[in-house]
Protein backbone atom coordinates (compact mmCIF):
# COMPACT_ATOMS: atom_id res chain seq x y z
CA UNK A 1 0.00 0.00 0.00
CA UNK A 2 1.52 3.32 -1.02
CA UNK A 3 1.71 6.11 1.54
CA UNK A 4 -0.53 8.32 -0.57
CA UNK A 5 -3.41 5.89 -0.08
CA UNK A 6 -3.18 5.86 3.70
CA UNK A 7 -5.92 7.51 5.71
CA UNK A 8 -5.70 10.28 8.30
CA UNK A 9 -6.05 7.74 11.09
CA UNK A 10 -3.70 5.90 13.38
CA UNK A 11 -3.85 2.68 15.34
CA UNK A 12 -3.15 2.77 19.10
CA UNK A 13 -3.13 -0.11 21.58
CA UNK A 14 -2.81 -0.18 25.37
CA UNK A 15 -2.85 -3.43 27.33
CA UNK A 16 -3.71 -2.29 30.84
CA UNK A 17 -4.95 0.58 32.99
CA UNK A 18 -1.64 2.44 33.30
CA UNK A 19 -1.09 2.21 29.54
CA UNK A 20 -4.61 3.51 28.96
CA UNK A 21 -3.88 6.59 31.08
CA UNK A 22 -0.65 7.55 29.35
CA UNK A 23 -2.21 6.67 26.01
CA UNK A 24 -5.01 9.16 26.66
CA UNK A 25 -2.46 11.90 27.34
CA UNK A 26 -0.66 11.05 24.10
CA UNK A 27 -3.89 11.10 22.09
CA UNK A 28 -4.68 14.58 23.41
CA UNK A 29 -1.17 15.78 22.57
CA UNK A 30 -1.39 14.27 19.07
CA UNK A 31 -4.71 16.02 18.52
CA UNK A 32 -2.94 19.35 18.93
CA UNK A 33 -0.16 18.36 16.51
CA UNK A 34 -2.27 16.39 14.02
CA UNK A 35 -5.83 17.78 14.33
CA UNK A 36 -7.14 15.97 11.25
CA UNK A 37 -6.14 12.52 12.49
CA UNK A 38 -8.45 10.10 14.31
CA UNK A 39 -7.49 7.11 16.43
CA UNK A 40 -8.78 3.54 16.75
CA UNK A 41 -7.55 0.42 18.48
CA UNK A 42 -7.36 -1.11 21.96
CA UNK A 43 -8.53 1.44 24.52
CA UNK A 44 -9.60 1.72 28.13
CA UNK A 45 -11.99 4.24 29.66
CA UNK A 46 -9.46 7.09 29.59
CA UNK A 47 -8.65 6.68 25.89
CA UNK A 48 -12.31 6.19 25.03
CA UNK A 49 -13.03 9.55 26.68
CA UNK A 50 -10.54 11.11 24.26
CA UNK A 51 -12.66 9.70 21.40
CA UNK A 52 -10.46 6.76 20.47
CA UNK A 53 -12.66 4.26 18.62
CA UNK A 54 -12.37 1.09 20.70
CA UNK A 55 -12.12 -1.98 18.48
CA UNK A 56 -11.25 -3.80 21.72
CA UNK A 57 -10.76 -2.76 25.34
CA UNK A 58 -7.85 -3.06 27.74
CA UNK A 59 -9.87 -5.63 29.70
CA UNK A 60 -9.47 -7.97 26.72
CA UNK A 61 -5.69 -7.87 27.20
CA UNK A 62 -5.36 -7.43 30.96
CA UNK A 63 -3.48 -10.62 31.77
CA UNK A 64 -0.08 -11.25 33.30
CA UNK A 65 2.05 -14.31 34.02
CA UNK A 66 2.97 -17.35 31.95
CA UNK A 67 0.13 -19.63 33.04
CA UNK A 68 -2.41 -16.82 32.77
CA UNK A 69 -1.34 -15.97 29.21
CA UNK A 70 -1.29 -19.61 28.07
CA UNK A 71 -4.89 -20.01 29.13
CA UNK A 72 -5.88 -17.03 27.00
CA UNK A 73 -3.92 -17.82 23.82
CA UNK A 74 -6.91 -18.78 21.61
CA UNK A 75 -8.85 -15.65 22.61
CA UNK A 76 -5.79 -13.44 22.10
CA UNK A 77 -5.23 -14.86 18.61
CA UNK A 78 -8.83 -14.11 17.67
CA UNK A 79 -8.43 -10.59 19.03
CA UNK A 80 -5.27 -10.09 17.00
CA UNK A 81 -7.08 -11.17 13.85
CA UNK A 82 -9.94 -8.74 14.55
CA UNK A 83 -7.57 -5.84 15.10
CA UNK A 84 -5.64 -6.54 11.92
CA UNK A 85 -8.88 -6.69 9.96
CA UNK A 86 -9.58 -3.15 11.15
CA UNK A 87 -6.07 -2.10 10.20
CA UNK A 88 -6.61 -3.50 6.71
CA UNK A 89 -9.88 -1.58 6.45
CA UNK A 90 -8.69 1.73 7.92
CA UNK A 91 -5.17 1.84 6.39
CA UNK A 92 -3.72 3.95 9.24
CA UNK A 93 -0.76 6.24 8.62
CA UNK A 94 1.06 4.93 11.70
CA UNK A 95 0.61 2.88 14.85
CA UNK A 96 1.43 3.52 18.50
CA UNK A 97 1.84 0.41 20.65
CA UNK A 98 1.95 1.08 24.41
CA UNK A 99 4.02 -1.31 26.55
CA UNK A 100 2.50 -4.86 26.65
CA UNK A 101 5.24 -6.50 24.51
CA UNK A 102 3.84 -10.03 24.70
CA UNK A 103 0.92 -9.00 22.51
CA UNK A 104 2.20 -5.85 20.85
CA UNK A 105 5.37 -7.33 19.36
CA UNK A 106 3.23 -9.81 17.43
CA UNK A 107 1.09 -6.92 16.25
CA UNK A 108 4.17 -4.92 15.29
CA UNK A 109 5.36 -7.68 12.99
CA UNK A 110 2.02 -7.79 11.18
CA UNK A 111 1.79 -4.00 11.01
CA UNK A 112 5.23 -3.75 9.41
CA UNK A 113 4.27 -6.39 6.84
CA UNK A 114 1.37 -4.08 5.96
CA UNK A 115 3.67 -1.08 5.53
CA UNK A 116 2.55 0.71 8.70
CA UNK A 117 5.13 2.75 10.62
CA UNK A 118 5.24 1.53 14.21
CA UNK A 119 6.08 3.58 17.30
CA UNK A 120 6.49 1.75 20.61
CA UNK A 121 5.56 4.04 23.51
CA UNK A 122 7.10 2.64 26.72
CA UNK A 123 9.94 0.30 25.90
CA UNK A 124 9.59 -3.47 26.40
CA UNK A 125 11.57 -4.50 29.48
CA UNK A 126 14.01 -6.64 27.51
CA UNK A 127 16.77 -5.29 29.75
CA UNK A 128 15.17 -7.40 32.51
CA UNK A 129 14.55 -10.51 30.46
CA UNK A 130 14.10 -11.50 26.86
CA UNK A 131 17.14 -9.76 25.35
CA UNK A 132 16.64 -12.08 22.42
CA UNK A 133 13.72 -9.83 21.45
CA UNK A 134 16.08 -6.97 20.57
CA UNK A 135 16.41 -8.26 17.01
CA UNK A 136 12.61 -8.20 16.66
CA UNK A 137 12.49 -4.65 17.98
CA UNK A 138 15.03 -3.51 15.39
CA UNK A 139 13.10 -5.30 12.65
CA UNK A 140 9.51 -4.41 13.50
CA UNK A 141 9.61 -1.15 15.51
CA UNK A 142 10.55 2.07 13.72
CA UNK A 143 11.13 3.99 16.94
CA UNK A 144 10.87 3.35 20.67
CA UNK A 145 9.67 6.31 22.73
CA UNK A 146 10.98 5.36 26.17
CA UNK A 147 10.05 6.68 29.61
CA UNK A 148 12.78 5.27 31.90
CA UNK A 149 16.16 7.03 32.01
CA UNK A 150 18.29 3.99 32.80
CA UNK A 151 17.24 2.02 29.70
CA UNK A 152 18.49 4.47 27.06
CA UNK A 153 22.08 3.21 27.07
CA UNK A 154 20.91 -0.41 26.85
CA UNK A 155 18.87 0.12 23.70
CA UNK A 156 21.19 2.52 21.91
CA UNK A 157 24.21 0.29 22.51
CA UNK A 158 22.31 -2.46 20.70
CA UNK A 159 21.41 -0.36 17.68
CA UNK A 160 17.74 0.18 18.57
CA UNK A 161 16.18 3.47 17.41
CA UNK A 162 15.34 4.78 20.88
CA UNK A 163 14.42 8.23 22.19
CA UNK A 164 13.92 9.01 25.87
CA UNK A 165 10.89 11.32 26.05
CA UNK A 166 10.58 11.80 29.82
CA UNK A 167 8.16 10.50 32.43
CA UNK A 168 4.39 10.59 31.84
CA UNK A 169 4.00 9.71 35.51
CA UNK A 170 5.58 13.00 36.55
CA UNK A 171 3.05 14.84 34.42
CA UNK A 172 0.21 12.95 36.11
CA UNK A 173 1.37 13.50 39.68
CA UNK A 174 1.87 17.22 39.05
CA UNK A 175 -1.92 17.46 38.61
CA UNK A 176 -2.71 15.95 42.03
CA UNK A 177 -3.83 18.57 44.55
CA UNK A 178 -6.01 17.13 47.28
CA UNK A 179 -6.36 17.17 51.07
CA UNK A 180 -7.60 14.51 53.47
CA UNK A 181 -10.39 16.76 54.63
CA UNK A 182 -11.79 16.85 51.11
CA UNK A 183 -12.16 13.07 51.32
CA UNK A 184 -13.71 13.15 54.78
CA UNK A 185 -10.58 11.60 56.33
CA UNK A 186 -8.98 12.63 59.63
CA UNK A 187 -5.82 14.76 59.27
CA UNK A 188 -4.19 12.86 62.15
CA UNK A 189 -5.24 9.25 61.61
CA UNK A 190 -2.47 7.03 60.08
CA UNK A 191 -3.40 6.17 56.49
CA UNK A 192 -1.83 3.34 54.49
CA UNK A 193 -2.54 3.16 50.76
CA UNK A 194 -2.69 -0.39 49.37
CA UNK A 195 -2.15 -0.88 45.64
CA UNK A 196 -2.84 -4.51 44.60
CA UNK A 197 -2.39 -3.95 40.84
CA UNK A 198 -4.65 -3.26 37.88
CA UNK A 199 -4.99 -6.76 36.40
CA UNK A 200 -7.59 -9.33 37.52
CA UNK A 201 -4.87 -11.88 38.30
CA UNK A 202 -3.06 -9.34 40.49
CA UNK A 203 -6.22 -8.64 42.46
CA UNK A 204 -6.74 -12.32 43.16
CA UNK A 205 -3.12 -12.91 44.22
CA UNK A 206 -2.15 -9.67 45.97
CA UNK A 207 -5.36 -8.64 47.73
CA UNK A 208 -5.13 -11.42 50.36
CA UNK A 209 -1.64 -10.16 51.24
CA UNK A 210 -3.01 -6.69 51.88
CA UNK A 211 -5.66 -8.08 54.23
CA UNK A 212 -2.97 -9.99 56.12
CA UNK A 213 -0.72 -6.94 56.41
CA UNK A 214 -3.65 -4.90 57.65
CA UNK A 215 -4.28 -7.48 60.39
CA UNK A 216 -0.62 -7.32 61.46
CA UNK A 217 -0.38 -3.54 61.57
CA UNK A 218 -3.73 -2.97 63.25
CA UNK A 219 -2.56 -4.94 66.30
CA UNK A 220 -0.22 -2.06 67.13
CA UNK A 221 -2.05 0.75 65.36
CA UNK A 222 -5.77 -0.03 65.72
CA UNK A 223 -6.77 3.39 64.39
CA UNK A 224 -4.79 3.00 61.15
CA UNK A 225 -6.92 3.24 58.00
CA UNK A 226 -6.06 1.04 55.04
CA UNK A 227 -7.38 2.45 51.74
CA UNK A 228 -7.43 0.27 48.60
CA UNK A 229 -7.98 2.06 45.26
CA UNK A 230 -9.56 -0.25 42.67
CA UNK A 231 -8.66 0.52 39.05
CA UNK A 232 -11.62 1.44 36.80
CA UNK A 233 -11.02 -1.63 34.63
CA UNK A 234 -11.41 -4.04 37.58
CA UNK A 235 -14.86 -5.45 38.30
CA UNK A 236 -15.86 -4.79 41.89
CA UNK A 237 -17.53 -8.22 41.79
CA UNK A 238 -14.05 -9.76 41.35
CA UNK A 239 -12.85 -7.96 44.48
CA UNK A 240 -15.94 -9.12 46.39
CA UNK A 241 -15.55 -12.72 45.21
CA UNK A 242 -11.84 -12.76 46.12
CA UNK A 243 -12.57 -11.56 49.63
CA UNK A 244 -15.45 -13.99 50.12
CA UNK A 245 -13.49 -17.00 48.86
CA UNK A 246 -10.45 -16.28 51.04
CA UNK A 247 -11.96 -14.70 54.14
CA UNK A 248 -15.68 -15.43 54.07
CA UNK A 249 -16.66 -11.76 54.01
CA UNK A 250 -17.64 -9.45 51.20
CA UNK A 251 -17.84 -5.75 50.46
CA UNK A 252 -20.31 -3.42 52.14
CA UNK A 253 -21.15 -0.04 50.54
CA UNK A 254 -19.75 2.89 52.50
CA UNK A 255 -21.62 6.16 52.09
CA UNK A 256 -22.77 5.02 48.62
CA UNK A 257 -21.66 7.35 45.88
CA UNK A 258 -19.69 9.66 48.16
CA UNK A 259 -16.25 10.00 49.73
CA UNK A 260 -16.06 13.21 51.71
CA UNK A 261 -17.01 16.04 49.37
CA UNK A 262 -16.42 13.93 46.25
CA UNK A 263 -18.77 11.64 44.37
CA UNK A 264 -16.76 8.41 44.54
CA UNK A 265 -17.86 4.80 44.95
CA UNK A 266 -16.61 3.40 48.26
CA UNK A 267 -16.88 0.09 50.15
CA UNK A 268 -15.55 -1.47 53.35
CA UNK A 269 -14.49 -4.99 54.28
CA UNK A 270 -12.46 -6.30 57.19
CA UNK A 271 -11.03 -2.94 58.14
CA UNK A 272 -10.13 -2.00 54.57
CA UNK A 273 -11.72 0.96 52.75
CA UNK A 274 -12.07 0.37 49.01
CA UNK A 275 -12.53 3.26 46.57
CA UNK A 276 -13.10 3.29 42.82
CA UNK A 277 -10.07 4.79 41.08
CA UNK A 278 -8.22 7.65 42.80
CA UNK A 279 -4.96 5.69 43.17
CA UNK A 280 -2.78 8.80 42.91
CA UNK A 281 -4.96 10.74 45.31
CA UNK A 282 -4.79 7.94 47.88
CA UNK A 283 -1.01 7.67 47.55
CA UNK A 284 -0.68 11.44 47.89
CA UNK A 285 -2.51 11.64 51.23
CA UNK A 286 -1.12 8.39 52.68
CA UNK A 287 1.55 8.19 55.38
CA UNK A 288 2.86 4.98 53.80
CA UNK A 289 1.93 2.56 51.02
CA UNK A 290 2.00 -1.16 50.31
CA UNK A 291 2.49 -1.45 46.57
CA UNK A 292 2.45 -4.28 44.05
CA UNK A 293 5.56 -3.89 41.93
CA UNK A 294 5.04 -1.88 38.76
CA UNK A 295 4.13 1.61 37.69
CA UNK A 296 2.67 2.42 41.12
CA UNK A 297 6.09 2.22 42.80
CA UNK A 298 7.39 5.11 40.73
CA UNK A 299 4.15 7.04 41.19
CA UNK A 300 4.51 6.62 44.95
CA UNK A 301 8.09 7.87 44.90
CA UNK A 302 7.21 10.92 42.80
CA UNK A 303 4.43 11.73 45.27
CA UNK A 304 6.90 11.40 48.14
CA UNK A 305 5.12 8.52 49.89
CA UNK A 306 7.23 5.92 51.78
CA UNK A 307 6.45 2.43 50.54
CA UNK A 308 7.06 -1.28 50.80
CA UNK A 309 6.78 -3.41 47.66
CA UNK A 310 4.97 -6.76 47.73
CA UNK A 311 4.09 -9.04 44.84
CA UNK A 312 2.71 -12.55 44.34
CA UNK A 313 2.27 -14.43 41.08
CA UNK A 314 1.32 -17.98 40.17
CA UNK A 315 3.85 -20.64 41.20
CA UNK A 316 4.73 -21.58 37.63
CA UNK A 317 5.13 -17.94 36.55
CA UNK A 318 7.41 -17.32 39.53
CA UNK A 319 9.62 -20.35 38.83
CA UNK A 320 10.04 -19.25 35.23
CA UNK A 321 10.69 -15.63 36.24
CA UNK A 322 13.45 -16.71 38.64
CA UNK A 323 15.28 -18.31 35.75
CA UNK A 324 14.95 -15.56 33.15
CA UNK A 325 14.87 -12.23 35.03
CA UNK A 326 18.39 -10.85 35.32
CA UNK A 327 17.81 -7.87 37.63
CA UNK A 328 18.65 -7.50 41.34
CA UNK A 329 15.39 -5.59 41.99
CA UNK A 330 11.84 -5.63 40.66
CA UNK A 331 10.54 -2.15 41.58
CA UNK A 332 11.13 0.78 39.24
CA UNK A 333 12.23 2.89 42.21
CA UNK A 334 15.14 0.61 43.11
CA UNK A 335 16.05 0.12 39.46
CA UNK A 336 16.26 3.87 38.85
CA UNK A 337 18.36 4.47 41.97
CA UNK A 338 20.48 1.39 41.28
CA UNK A 339 20.24 0.26 44.90
CA UNK A 340 17.68 -0.91 47.44
CA UNK A 341 15.88 2.25 48.52
CA UNK A 342 12.59 0.49 49.36
CA UNK A 343 12.10 -3.03 50.69
CA UNK A 344 10.80 -5.69 48.28
CA UNK A 345 8.91 -8.81 49.33
CA UNK A 346 8.32 -11.09 46.35
CA UNK A 347 6.36 -14.37 46.33
CA UNK A 348 7.77 -16.04 49.45
CA UNK A 349 7.71 -13.76 52.48
CA UNK A 350 6.36 -13.32 55.97
CA UNK A 351 3.35 -11.08 56.53
CA UNK A 352 4.88 -10.20 59.89
CA UNK A 353 7.98 -8.85 58.10
CA UNK A 354 5.86 -6.73 55.79
CA UNK A 355 3.82 -5.45 58.70
CA UNK A 356 6.99 -4.57 60.62
CA UNK A 357 8.27 -2.67 57.59
CA UNK A 358 5.05 -0.67 57.35
CA UNK A 359 5.30 0.22 61.05
CA UNK A 360 8.91 1.28 60.56
CA UNK A 361 7.95 3.56 57.68
CA UNK A 362 5.29 5.14 59.88
CA UNK A 363 7.39 5.57 63.02
CA UNK A 364 11.03 6.09 62.02
CA UNK A 365 11.23 9.83 61.36
CA UNK A 366 14.88 9.80 60.30
CA UNK A 367 14.11 7.15 57.70
CA UNK A 368 11.10 9.12 56.48
CA UNK A 369 13.28 12.21 56.07
CA UNK A 370 15.86 10.23 54.07
CA UNK A 371 13.19 8.88 51.74
CA UNK A 372 11.63 12.32 51.40
CA UNK A 373 14.98 13.72 50.28
CA UNK A 374 15.63 10.88 47.81
CA UNK A 375 12.13 11.01 46.33
CA UNK A 376 12.23 14.80 46.07
CA UNK A 377 15.55 14.65 44.24
CA UNK A 378 14.12 12.06 41.84
CA UNK A 379 11.08 14.25 41.21
CA UNK A 380 13.30 17.26 40.46
CA UNK A 381 15.60 15.38 38.07
CA UNK A 382 13.06 13.32 36.14
CA UNK A 383 11.87 15.28 33.09
CA UNK A 384 8.16 15.56 32.34
CA UNK A 385 6.10 16.56 29.28
CA UNK A 386 6.47 13.03 27.91
CA UNK A 387 3.22 13.03 25.91
CA UNK A 388 4.00 16.37 24.29
CA UNK A 389 7.56 15.30 23.43
CA UNK A 390 6.38 11.97 21.99
CA UNK A 391 3.64 13.70 19.99
CA UNK A 392 6.17 16.16 18.53
CA UNK A 393 8.38 13.30 17.36
CA UNK A 394 5.47 11.41 15.80
CA UNK A 395 4.00 14.50 14.16
CA UNK A 396 7.34 15.45 12.59
CA UNK A 397 7.63 11.95 11.15
CA UNK A 398 4.07 12.02 9.78
CA UNK A 399 4.35 15.48 8.19
CA UNK A 400 7.90 15.12 6.83
CA UNK A 401 8.46 14.40 3.11
CA UNK A 402 7.52 10.78 2.51
CA UNK A 403 5.16 10.67 5.48
CA UNK A 404 5.50 8.35 8.46
CA UNK A 405 8.06 5.95 7.14
CA UNK A 406 11.22 4.47 8.51
CA UNK A 407 13.17 6.63 6.06
CA UNK A 408 11.91 9.81 7.69
CA UNK A 409 12.57 8.83 11.31
Image (cartoon, rainbow, N blue to C red):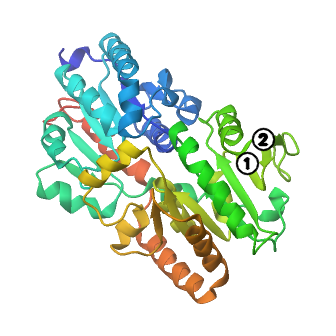
Point out residue 77 in the picture as x, y percentages from the top left corner: 33, 19
Quadrant for the C terminus, please.
top left
From the viewer's perspective, tell me whether residue 298 is left or right of residue 271. Answer: left
Tag of residue 310: none
Q: Are marks 1 and 2 in contact (CB under 8 Å)?
A: yes
Would residue 268 be visible to someone looking at this image?
Answer: yes
From the viewer's perspective, tell me whether residue 366 is left or right of residue 294. Answer: right
Asked if residue 2 is positioned above or below residue 156 in the image, the reply reads above
Mark 1 or mark 2, which has the lower sequence index? 2
* SS category of the residue bearing label 1: strand
Identify the residue at image location x=38%, y=58%: 166
From the viewer's perspective, tell me whether residue 186 is left or right of residue 383. Answer: right
Identify the residue at image location x=47%, y=64%: 345
Quadrant for the N terminus, please.
top left
What crowding class fits label 2: few (fewer than 14 Cα within 10 Å), some (14-19), or many (20 or more)? Answer: many
Identify the residue at image location x=14%, y=41%: 138
From the viewer's perspective, tell me whether residue 224 is left or right of residue 146. Answer: right
Asked if residue 348 is positioned above or below residue 253 in the image, the reply reads below
Asked if residue 226 is positioned above or below residue 118 in the image, the reply reads below
Identify the residue at image location x=54%, y=67%: 308
* SS category of the residue bearing label 2: loop
Would residue 285 be visible to someone looking at this image?
Answer: no
Residue position for label 1? 274
* Label 1 vs label 2, nearer the camera: 2
Q: Quadrant of residue 144?
A: top left
What crowding class fits label 1: few (fewer than 14 Cα within 10 Å), some (14-19), or many (20 or more)? Answer: many
Residue position for label 2? 251
Point out residue 318 in the picture as x, y percentages from the top left corner: 37, 49
Point out residue 336 in the picture as x, y percentages from the top left corner: 36, 68
Q: CA distance from mark 1 to mark 2?
A: 9 Å
Amino acid sequence: MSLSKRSNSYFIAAGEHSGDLIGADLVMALREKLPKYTAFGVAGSAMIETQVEAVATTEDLSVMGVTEVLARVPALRMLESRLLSWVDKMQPSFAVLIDNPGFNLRLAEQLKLRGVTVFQYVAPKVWAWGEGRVARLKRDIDMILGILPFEEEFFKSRGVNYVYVGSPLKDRINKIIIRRETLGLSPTRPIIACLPGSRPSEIALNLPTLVGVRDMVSKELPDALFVVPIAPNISIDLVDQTLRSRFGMGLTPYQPGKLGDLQVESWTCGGLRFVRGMSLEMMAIADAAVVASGTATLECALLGTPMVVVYTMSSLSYEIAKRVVKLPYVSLVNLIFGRKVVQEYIQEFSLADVGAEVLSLLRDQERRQDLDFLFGDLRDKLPGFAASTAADIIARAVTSPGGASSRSI
